[in-house]
Amino acid sequence: MSPRSRLGLRSFAAWLLAATVAGCALVAAGAAGEARAAAAETGSEGNQAEGRVLAANAASWSDPAGDADPLAPDITSVSVFNTDGGVLVIRVDLPDSEHLVFGESVSVWFDVDQNTRTGSGGGGGAEFLVSVDGFTGVSLQEWEDDAWLDVYSSVSASWRFGPTITLDLYELGSPGTFNFWVGAGWKGASGEHFDFAPGDGGWWSYQVLPPVPDPVDPPDPGEDEEDEELLLRPPTGGEFGYEQPASTFEGELVVVHYVTEGPDAPPLNDDDGSGLSDYVEEIAAAADRSLLTFELLGFETPLADTAGPDERPDIYVKRLDARILGLAVSPGYGEGGSFVIVDTRLDPASVELSRFSLQTTVAHELFHLVQYAYLPDGDMPRWIAEGTASAVELLTFPEIDDIGLIGQIDSWISEPWRELHDESNGCERCYGGAIWWHNLHRDDPGLLPAYFDRLARLSKRGQDFGIGAAALSALIGQRQTFGQGFGSLYEAFVELSAEIYRAGHGPGAYRTLTPKRAPRTTRVLRVKGLSTHYIPVKIRRGTKRLQIRISTTDGPVPDVRLIIGGTDGRTAKPRLRQNGRAIVFTPRLLNKRDRGSVMLIITSGHRNAAAYKITHYTR
């Protein structure tokens, strides 16, 4: 049998299905916690992602039909392309396999150094293996220490007459050219059956080329932009229209609108005997408390509401889509300015461990109205808008542990290799960034209002502030925010990364090192800008000394820390080599506790990514 017959499939986490909903909405995203996302169709967040997807170098290859075991899935063609954003897409055509079934699998081997003498012998020199199978889903593995090891990654796949596999090129070491081959298999009562492409132990080669820019036509100076249609308020009709006449309840600082019949009616129980729905009263109370808190924190008040009974913000109670719990509409898009819609199914109990809390949702959505007071067009980057709104809801209702937000923060911590400003997958990471913004506020309570004001001034001057990182870094430096002497956003992020581990939050591991007596060196690894690799180091019994060398191969030198003895253990002292581009640790391991918990923390305290290699061994 071909040496590629051992597919090397290993267990992987179950599929994670993420829904992308547009506008500034609070979205239920499954057991991992409810994710807030903004819906493009409502336009409640200003910026929309645009641009080309495909790069210029898509390639395809054919494989003869019926050239292998007749019981194996038959590969007929394979196509590959990479996107402008560095995403690799591989399509494997299996005309007889409409759906992925139990026992069926497809694997892709990558020889990224194009040297068959290195990497897996059974994989023909491959260093990486992507597998899609009917047992465990999709996985990425790397050949290291003479075995295939699971690698945490963003790899995903869909199946329709074969798989379409997507992963980031940096997870393969960002190769310029790589060799690859594909295998399809089926395991049944009669044994294992395979088809490999290309056959006879060959391979295909793919070159990753930079994209060719699309030509841009100059705008027609005589062409007027079409007026954007305003989103109507529920009493007026439209997409969120009420089916019944609306009633109002006035709080001190807001006006709440609701109906008492039909599917849009909130819970109508009146436990306090006031003659009014407790749910409506709780919305008004939460809103009043929120706006007072925002004022005490130093933020601007929301812009005047010109469509309601007065200038106070209007909140509409409405049954929303099953995934959306709250919605804020920007002034330029909403009828009469900005307003908020809140779902009817939130938990009004103001106690710990509230499930999708009514109070925190009201605070979150009202804070978007505060953001619109600074940037009325909704031009605040979403990672900032959603992260700060989530942080401020924590400050407004510290006594409520919202299960949804807890899940979002846990998810953020579990994937620290993603950038701080990562807005992919419907910006699901943005909400968990509350931990970052909350820590900034803790160290400098006046920072967030000052930051919003700076973004507003840059916008009024017509200056493009991009993702907002440079403006934040400059502001932190000017304010001398931290007593430790941090001078920038990047230094603050490095400290947060160490603090997350020290606090026992259990951040997700990027990979694991198992040093032996013979020195071993990893492939080139890449830590993205404003992201962190947590790398546990497994130490054998009886080891007295550890040696780890981190060599920067490209980009800025990352911050590197080695913590020995657990979360409250000591930080090993590094030595610098090669003008600071190599960092060496040679700590003694004094006892069982030292050997039981060693954590290497590598952080790109910069906007740019850092490439590095790790050489490790024990004595």
Image: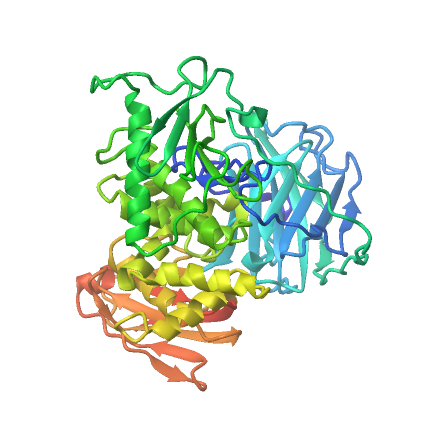
- Identify the residue at horizontal 24%, vertical 45% (top origin): 398
Counting from the top left corner in percent of width and height, residue 506 is at 30, 52
Say above or below: 456 vs 366: below
Q: Is residue 110 left or right of residue 417?
A: right
Q: Quadrant of residue 63?
A: top right
- Identify the residue at horizontal 35%, vertical 26% (top origin): 249
Counting from the top left corner in percent of width and height, residue 516 is at 36, 66
Q: Is residue 212 left or right of residue 427?
A: right
Say above or below: 557 vs 234: below
Would residue 531 be seen by someone viewing this image from the given angle?
A: no
Task: State the residue lying farthest toward the top.
Answer: 261
Q: Is residue 189 left or right of residue 184?
A: left
The total of numbered circles placed on residues is 0
Instruction: Compare residues 312 and 185 and report the one nearer the observer.
Output: 312
- Identify the residue at horizontal 42%, vertical 47% (top origin): 302
Counting from the top left corner in percent of width and height, residue 550 is at 42, 73
Q: Quadrant of the C terminus?
A: bottom left
Q: Quadrant of residue 45?
A: top right
Q: Quadrant of residue 589?
A: bottom left
Q: Is residue 462 left or right of residue 590?
A: right
Counting from the top left corner in percent of width and height, residue 4 is at 62, 47
Would residue 586 be seen by someone viewing this image from the given angle?
A: yes
Colouring style: rainbow
Task: State the residue lying farthest toward the bottom.
Answer: 579
Instruction: Compare residues 295 and 572 and report the one nearer the observer.
Output: 295
Q: Quadrant of the N terminus?
A: top right
Instruction: Compare residues 55 and 67 and report the one nearer the observer.
Output: 55
Say above or below: 519 vs 38: below
